[in-house]
Amino acid sequence: MVYISSWQQYQEAAEALYEKSPNTTRYCVKWRQSADGAGKLVLKITDNTTCLKFKTHSSVFLNRFDALNLSLMQKMQNRRPTQASIAPSTSQAPAETARQSPAPGAAPTPAGPAGGGVKKKKPKKKK
């Protein structure tokens, strides 16, 4: 188990390790909160023969961590990034884009029980 100090080296090595043996590779994320308010993020990827680890206390790596997660999850699902997930299409009219995105500050409203809500009971009829 070796801690890699450079993020770029870790990301390249992690993706190469997954591509080498996708059926046996495991990816583990640990977050440890400390008493002083700072946390420690530890990333580990292994295929039972090679183990790569990265450790940081800096919050600067969170965006890079998200990008690595997205990349690995797409490889695990055997998908390529779609154009919609990268950037909005420029061929759409501005009116269509405005209809698709909710107002800034408006909370999404769940529709029915599928949205996580519970059905309201019907009131009892008066006799």
Image (cartoon, helix red, strand yellow):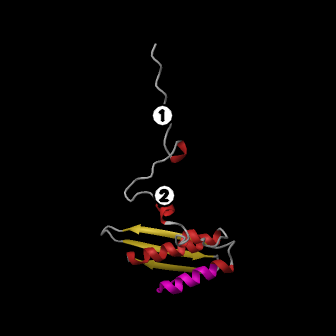
Q: Which residues are magenta?
A: 3-17
Assess disc 1: are there few (<14), some (14-19) or many (≥20) residues with their C-alpha within 10 Å of its C-alpha: few
Assess disc 2: are there few (<14), some (14-19) or many (≥20) residues with their C-alpha within 10 Å of its C-alpha: few
Residue 120's disc number: 1
Where residue 6 appears, as percent x and y from the top left, is 47, 86
Can the viewer see residue 57 in this picture?
no
Looking at the image, which residue is at 45% across and 52% down? 108
- Foreground mark, 2 or 1, reads 2
Q: Secondary structure at mark 2?
A: helix
Q: Pick whichever, 67 or 4, lies toward us.
A: 67
Where residue 120 appears, as percent x and y from the top left, is 48, 34
Q: List the single residue furthest toward the left.
A: 36
Q: Pick whichever, 32 or 86, lies toward us.
A: 86
Say what amino acid the circle numbered 1 marks. Lys
Residue 68's disc number: none
Say what amino acid the circle numbered 2 marks. Arg
Where residue 94 appears, as percent x and y from the top left, is 48, 65
Can the viewer see residue 44 in this picture?
yes
User: Looking at the rendering, which quadrant does residue 24 occupy?
Assistant: bottom right
Looking at the image, which residue is at 64% across and 77% down? 18
Labels 2 and 1: the sequence-earlier one: 2
The quarter in which the N terminus is drawn is bottom right
Residue corresponding to mark 2: 99
State how far apart marks 2 and 1 are (Cα).
29 Å
